[in-house]
Image: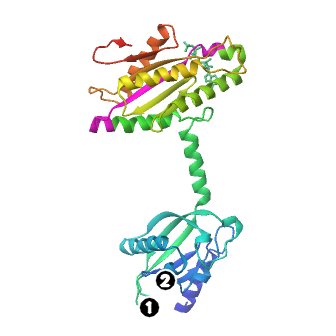
Amino acid sequence: MSTVTCISELKAFAMALPDPVFVLSETGVYIDIVGGQDSRFYVDSSVLIGKTVFDVLPEEKAQWFLQQIQNGLNHDGLYVINYELDGREVKGTVVAENLAGIVHFEGRIQKLDHLVNGERTVVWVAVNVSKRHALEQELRRLSDFDCLSGVLSRRKIMFELAQHYSQFSRYARTCSALILDLDYFKKVNDAYGHLVGDEVLKRVAQTCQTQLRDCDLLARLGGDEFMVLLPNTEMDEVLVLAERLRSAVENLRFIDLPTTCRISVSIGASVFFAGDDRKENILERADKALYRAKDRGKNQVQSYRPQDSLFYV
Ligand SMILES: Nc1nc2c(ncn2[C@@H]2O[C@H](COP(=O)(O)OP(=O)(O)OP(=O)(O)O)[C@@H](O)[C@H]2O)c(=O)[nH]1
């Protein structure tokens, strides 16, 4: 096979690729573009050949592209990046309606070992990963949020707790936690049905959320149990907030429940202490305080400090 045949065959292979392959010089010139003929996923970019990234992209974006070309040239092997691009930002291309808006790309950049017009060059394969990106976002949403109440999931708040514990053990940054558990919730379900019970869980979650600061995190741990994580908060402050949450829930009214049926929560509070060696310590104490609140008649706040092994409040 002659070299010419080889090159033309290689070009035919590249043309048949679903993703566009750009040959870009180190000053950002589009030297060649092949592939990417699938109009469901890509805009026809052939008009860009001979232009530079500065001719067709906003200045900031063009600078960013140039930096990635440099990174690709300085990198041994394949250099992979992720980026977003709105086809309407690219001057000269015609953007079909299905591609108008932000498209998520994976850029696969590989330097070439020859010069074109005296310049070093890279091959840049732009793979449209918008569907994968949307799926990843959806999976993250499903894993981070509780689907009934809309507040954070257990998994997410445990991750956050680990971060705050590490901030506490490294920099002594205080952090408090509350565990809330609805009182007599089984009776609500039994008497009025699970759908009404679900509504109660949602309203309690929404009500607590409105009482919290932006930096506070609220999660449903499961069943009728919730947790609040309060960064930079000492015990005296957290007790004020816990009392506010308790009172807000007590004052809720539900159209599906008779006025005699009042919803309330018991709350256990704790903060990180110097002797804590695991993130779970704070939860164990908050749990103990919660049991104490239940024992003492429910609809109240209790807290727990490790040094005296006594409940106070
Ligand atoms: N409606 C509804 N109920 C749930 C859900 N998850 C758990 N539950 C119910 O929540 C109730 C939890 O009851 P418990 O916390 O054990 O008991 P309780 O009646 O609240 O009693 P105390 O906590 O001691 O006041 C159980 O009846 C569960 O079936 C849910 O997603 N929706």
Taking the image as shown, residue 109 lies to the left or right of residue 222, namely left
Residue ranking furthest to the top: 296
Placement of 306 over or under 74, stated as above or below: above
Residue 139 magenta: no
Along the polypeptide, which appears first: circle 1 or circle 2? 2
C-beta proximity under 8 Å, tags 1 and 2: yes
Q: Is residue 296 visible?
A: yes
Q: Position of residue 99 (x, y in %)?
A: 66, 66
Q: Residue at x 52, y 26 (%)?
A: 226
Disc 1 on helix, strand or loop?
loop
Residue numbers of the magenta segment: 167-187
* Residue at the spot of label 1: 117
Figure quadrant of residue 185: top right
Q: Which quadrant of the rendered structure holds the N terminus?
A: bottom right
Foreground residue among 244 and 30:
244
Vertical position of residue 173 compared to residue 258: above or below: below
Residue 143 picture location, percent across and down: 55, 40
Q: Residues within 10 Å of mark 1 (few under 14, many from 20)?
A: few
Using the image, determine if residue 126 lies above or below residue 56: above
Amino acid type, callout 1: Asn
Residue 240 versus residue 215 in the image, above or below: above
Q: Which mark is residue 29?
A: 2
